[in-house]
Image (tube, rainbow, N blue to C red):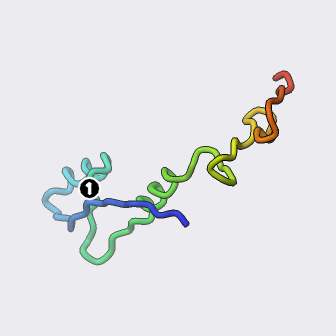
Amino acid sequence: MLEVGLTVFAERAVRSARREEELLERDREMLFHDGRKLDLREEAREALLLEFPMVQRCSEDCKGLCLRCGADLNQGPHECPASP
């Protein structure tokens, strides 16, 4: 299971301040909504993606696979085939 913290600042949109709202949304500082619905799918997706490890491993002490040839690094040192 993966638990991820998510903090979002949101406010109900005001028609008179639309240009300022667009700038804040573009800079991802604040989300604006119509008072009925606030779509947080993209923010949740981004928060989850940032928490996934760059290299998948089966356990904490696993050394993973060689990024060049895919050899199991837990089996000891190896020599990668020469790159073309």
Query: Residue at 76% across / 38% down in the picture?
Result: 73
Question: Which residue is the extreme one toward the right?
Answer: 81
Q: Residues within 10 Å of mark 1 (few under 14, many from 20)?
A: some
- Which residue is pictured at 75% across the width and 36% down the height? 66
**Rendering coords of residue 78 (x, y %):** 83, 29
Give the farthest residue toward the left. 16
Q: Nearer the viewer, residue 49 or 1?
A: 1
Relative placement, left or right, of 22 versus 75 is left
The residue closer to the viewer here, 45 or 4, is 4
Q: Residue 36: give x, y in percent of width and height.
A: 29, 77
Q: Is residue 44 above or below residue 84?
A: below
Which is more toward the observer, 9 or 50?
50
* 64 left or right, relative to 84: left
Q: Secondary structure at mark 1?
A: loop
Q: Position of residue 31 (x, y in %)?
A: 28, 59
Q: Nearer the viewer, residue 80 or 45?
A: 80
| Left or right, 55 with reference to 37 | right
* Residue 3 position (above or below residue 55): below
The residue wearing badge 1 is 30
